[in-house]
Image (cartoon, rainbow, N blue to C red):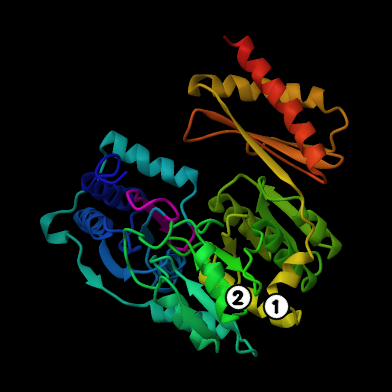
Amino acid sequence: MVNDDLTPGLAARIGQAVVTCSGAERVAVGRDTRTSGPMLEAAAVAGLLSAGANVWQVGVVPTPVLAFLTRELKANAGIMITASHNPPQYNGLKIFNADGMAYDMKGQDKVEETIGKGQLRTADWAEVGISQQRDESRLYAETVCRKVKLRRKWHVVVDPGCGATYSLAPQILKSLGCKVTTFNAQAEGHFPARSPEPTGEALKPLAEVVKGFGADVGVAFDGDGDRAAFIDEKGSLADSDRTLAVYAAHVAKQRAGAVIVTSVEASMSIEKMVEQCHGTVVRTKVGDVYVSEEMKKRKAVFGGEPCGAWIHPQLHYCPDGILTSALLLKALEEEDTELSKFVAQAPAYPTVRENIACKNTEKDRIMRQLGEGLKTAYPDRRDVSSIDGIRIVVQKGWMLVRASGTEPLIRLTVEAESLRTANKIMEKSTILVRKLMEEGN
């Protein structure tokens, strides 16, 4: 929360800590459209300069553009000031290394530890850094237009939701030859038009516009443009899991033995689709940082999460909503189909979710004991994973139990081939969780 948890003083210390930890001499800084962005940018830049780094302020840009420019401009680090899909009263700082990849937990922990110990570098007065304003977003736009070529004149309705893609997304799609109708395409940090998170409820007006205009596709971005959601030509929200699965299969068809990376929360439809194309699916912890790390490690051709954060390694390892929208249109061209028919290729499975209140002090015990308990409860299990919570694959579905990192909750997710099976798995699992909680009281 801005001016509560996240103050200008903390933003300045983060800037100092980034230079202290990395020795960065040049840092690129960008922000989304939030009203607190200029304040926090000024503070973070002050911290960077005070530690002796030179700063390139690239202005209001989507997060993937900041990541791209960090690498292209040969900066040693990048800082994006954004709270992504969260409400307008929140903000944050996302740090990137020289390769344009977000800091992993080890890197983040090092920054936090440095701040906690107060071991912050301060340059001599004569070595304080210099700041420059640099609008280099055209480099990103030119690169996308070189990577993607479209033959058809698609009619696309673009809804940036008053976020960071408000200008660049329509511009790039027009450059690719699309007919573009914009909707909520102005920079407004209070996000008055809709939530920065492109949920089904928030995108109902976009769906009406797509249907009313007879457009081919509607695309909506979150607050910082690393996520995209799609409306098909019928005015329906494209299911995010199925869209991810069928696009992953499309990519896998083009590369023998392709590796696709996703998180433990994604639908089993992705295995169904990718394995038909002789590809392999690898699952990671929830979070695009973990997906991108695993992709780089395994030389994966594509990766993403159901939230709409897709990573295309042919450009970079940051989730990229604008590039995703362009490449999805290209996939529709290559398969000569419409979005609704494209998504319909992936099977639809019912998913049920439940949250169980759990004291933060009890989470570790519950999760430790739950591992053995679930193995006993599901003797016919096909697979067990503990990379992020506990994920058990059974004959006709799977279940995932994770301790919330932000709330006193244990979260359960179940997907199965039928709703009846999903409800049975959920009932069995919740009984076990509640029993363990009672034993601790």
Query: Type of residue at label 2?
Result: Val
Which numbered tag is attached to residue 217? 2
Identify residue for label 1. Answer: 332
Which secondary structure lies at badge 1? helix
Q: Which residues are magenta?
A: 84-101
Residue at (64, 89) in percent of width and height: 152
Which secondary structure lies at badge 2? strand
Residue 427 visible: yes
**Horizontal side of residue 365 vs 94, given as left or right:** right
Eyeballing the image, is 439 above or below 123? above
Query: Image quadrant of residue 69?
Result: bottom left
Callout 1 touching callout 2 (CB < 8 Å): yes
Query: Image quadrant of residue 313?
Result: bottom right
Mark 2, other Cα within 10 Å: few <14 / some 14–19 / many ≥20: many
- For marks 1 and 2 on the same chain, the one whose residue lies earlier in the sequence: 2
Q: CA distance from mark 1 to mark 2?
A: 11 Å
Residue at (25, 46) in percent of width and height: 13
Q: Which SS does the magenta portion mostly show?
A: loop
Q: Give whichever of 181, 378 is nearer the camera.
A: 181
Mark 1, other Cα within 10 Å: few <14 / some 14–19 / many ≥20: some
On the image, the x and y values in percent for residue 328 come to: 64, 73
Residue at (62, 70) in percent of width and height: 235
Residue at (82, 28) in percent of width and height: 378
Eyeballing the image, is 337 above or below 431? below
Query: Type of residue at label 1?
Result: Leu
Q: Is residue 247 magenta?
A: no
Query: Image quadrant of residue 131?
Result: bottom left
Q: Quadrant of the N terminus?
A: top left
